[in-house]
Image: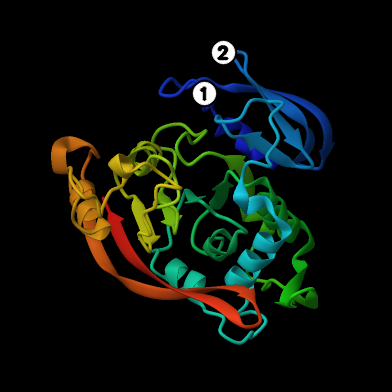
Amino acid sequence: MKERLLDLLICPVCLPEEHRLNEAIQEKLGDDILTGALTCSACGRTYRIEQGVALLDAALNPSQAYSHNKYETPAVVSSYLWSHYGDLLKEENSSDAYRRWSEMMRSHTGICIDAGTAVGRFAFEMTGRCDFVIGVDNARAFIREARDLLLDRRRTIRLKEEGWLTRTVEFAIPEEWDSQKVEFIVADALALPFRANMASSLASLNLVDKVPDPLMHLMEMNRVTGDENAQFLLSDPFSWSEEAAPEHNWLGGQKQGPYTLRGREHIMKLLAGENGILQPPWNIETEGRLWWHIRTHANHYEHIRSCYIKATR
């Protein structure tokens, strides 16, 4: 973890109170903290730093394993690496969706947060558009891959072809993606370990229908982004399911309740200030749809259309 993050982090367990985390560094290489701990000055909760990754997920006990997360399997990690970087390999059926999402963001000073960063493509793209980017995900395997890519600047992916048949591909990231301007941490999008108003932009790509409380995710986005000169990009297929969240928490497609319309419509209303939940209100700059793909094996791809909303204030 880059040392500069120390001044940006707070205890996610203590939210909405903002309490600094005190560092105890055990191993360091230059400005990179490899091993250590961050302890809340108020509640005493300790968060580990392991192999350069800060583990700041408030939902987990310090001793709890990460096997509960379905995104931790090697097959899923390979699938997401292909989805994010397949266009660099000129892979059949790959898409350039992450590049296109990044191009929707205006260049700005300050910090960008990529919530639900997965294996980091959008965060890397944003290094050319702002001062610093923080990729956040609660899947430790995703963050490990993203950080290894930050350090090594190339990765090898083992892709499933059919049954037990696989093939190996390797890619390198473009020179213009600046490893010094990006960092990745394990944290929960419903309890971001950042002070209020610290970010100039935030992206939530294909995440809002995967969290147990989508409205809380929007409220956390709203809390950490600035009241002025801020950008927000949300893109999602709105595949609401009770596996991810109870129906009463969905922001669209409910049988009854306040969110019976399409999720895109409800989220635009919330951003515009409906019911005073997200304040100050956001201005909808543009909205549309973008296709992207996930590869399971050589003969099976998911073809997904996400609805995007770009807002500013």
Q: Which residue is at 32% across, 50% downward?
A: 229
Query: What kind of element bears circle 2?
Result: loop
Is residue 282 visible in the rendered image? The answer is no
Q: Answer with the quarter of the image where residue 234 lies.
A: bottom left
Question: Residue 13 bears which disc, if any?
Answer: 1
| Identity, as a three-letter code, of the amino acid under mark 1 | Val
**Residue closer to the observer: 94 or 240:** 240
Q: Give how far across and how far down residue 213 sits, in percent.
A: 38, 39
Note whether residue 308 is visible. Answer: yes
In the rendered image, the vertical position of residue 90 relative to residue 154, given as above or below = below
Quadrant of the image containing the N terminus: top right
Q: Which of the pair 111/306 is nearer the observer?
A: 306
Q: Is residue 32 above or below residue 108?
A: above
Query: Which residue shows up at 74% across the image and 75% down it?
Result: 163
Q: Is residue 172 above or below residue 223?
A: below
Label 1 with label 2: CB-CB less than 8 Å: yes
Residue at 76 percent of width and 67 percent of height: 155
Disc nearer the start of the sequence (1/2): 1
Q: Position of residue 250 (x, y in %)?
A: 31, 47
Packing grade of label 1 (10 A; few <14, some 14-19, many >=20) is some
Mark 2, other Cα within 10 Å: few <14 / some 14–19 / many ≥20: few
- How far is mark 1 from mark 2, CA to CA? 8 Å
Residue wearing tag 2: 43
Determine the residue positioned at 68% across, 30% down. 64
Q: Where residue 72 sits: x, y (%)?
A: 67, 51
**Residue 60, picture quadrant:** top right
Residue 25 in picture, x, y percent from top left? 78, 27
Give the amino acid type for the residue marked by disc 2 in the picture.
Cys
